[in-house]
Amino acid sequence: MRASATAGIEFFGTTMRYSEVEQYGAQHRLLRLGDCDFEFDVSEVLFELGTQKYLDVVTDALSEIFLGTTATRFRIAIHHPTARIFKSLRISGDDDESSQENVAFESALMHDEAWTKEDRQTVLAQPRSPSTVSAQAPTLEPILVSELSGPVRQRLHAVTSGIPEASPDVISSTEALLAVVRETASKDDFDGYQLSIGLYPSYTEFTVTRGREWISSQIRSEIERGDVAYFAVHFLGLSGVTMVNDVRVRIYGTGVSQEQLETLGSVFFDRVSVLNPISTVDLETDQFDDEFQFESFVVCLGAAL
């Protein structure tokens, strides 16, 4: 069995985070992890303005960072609200064309502007069981949908043009999070409910999983930090989780603080902690500075898993 490497890239605000993970069988080894701060809002440049001189700066930075890379796959994780990310359902056994038509109809209902099939990506949200029998009665399968406009996709391909043979896939930040959650759940042998809370300056994301199964996600824009616990309990109820005492809570993102841990701890007690994605790879955390914020790399590292 040959090892293969995947690179993960994330843009948010003025910062680009990057990672590279080598996989051999079920083992993951971290090859690189870091960030790069620009003197401009890189998210705005890539996803809105498209200013060429700044795009060239990003292209040069990526070329330098991934000089000599062994990665054969590149994944760029996109945050809300740059991408439209939502949950849908499909009937198991449906052909792709029927599923795409249904998702396109849902998207048109939720947004003012309709995007093309080429702008849309659908991912089966639950890991398939190897024992699944095709002869079983059809069921509803949850799918994770992300949509990103064509011009933005073109810019993302352009800024990776300096990396030999790089043709990046674009995934949602939710999909990247789920990769980390599933890896940590497998390592912990955890099959209960987990509420993952992504704390960012412009939004908060709540995601409920059970073991490796995705239940639901929700985005809240610019809520007061003191209200996160309230919305967490509310979202659990909407997701059908009524026994709050059975839920463990993991927080991640660039807005994690001791204050948030204490506030959530007043509701979830000792079941609250920071989601450290480094446990998904073969690497000891003491190789980094004590103040290194692993929780801010959840999406970036998840893109490489």
Image (cartoon, rainbow, N blue to C red):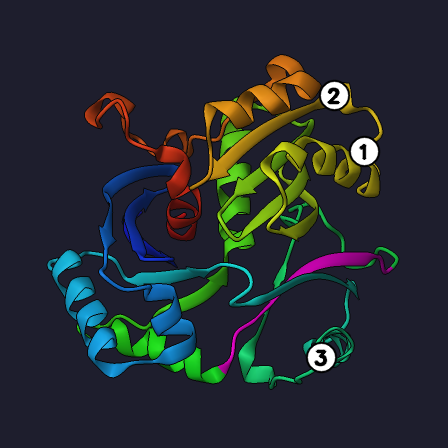
Q: What stretch is highlighted in magenta?
A: 138-149
Residue 212: which disc?
none
Which residue, as the protein is rendered here, is positioned at the far top? 270
User: How many discs appear?
Assistant: 3
Residue 223 in sight: yes
Which numbered disc, 3 or 2, marks the residue that appears first in the sequence?
A: 3
**Among numbered discs 1 and 2, the one appearing first in the sequence:** 1
Q: Main secondary structure of the magenta part?
A: strand
- Identify the residue under disc 2: 246
Residue under circle 3? Answer: 104
Could you say whether the residue bearing mark 2 is in a helix, strand or loop?
helix
Q: Is residue 63 above or below residue 221?
A: below
When asked about the image quadrant of residue 109, the answer is bottom right
**Residue 145 colored in magenta in the image:** yes
Q: Position of residue 13 (x, y in %)?
A: 37, 57
Is residue 262 rendered to the left or right of residue 304? right
Residue 256, image x, y percentages: 47, 33
In the rendered image, residue 144, in percent from the top left (x then y), is placed at 64, 60
Query: What element does badge 3 sit on?
Result: helix
Identify the residue under disc 1.
Answer: 241
**Distance Cα–Cα, label 3 vs label 1:** 29 Å
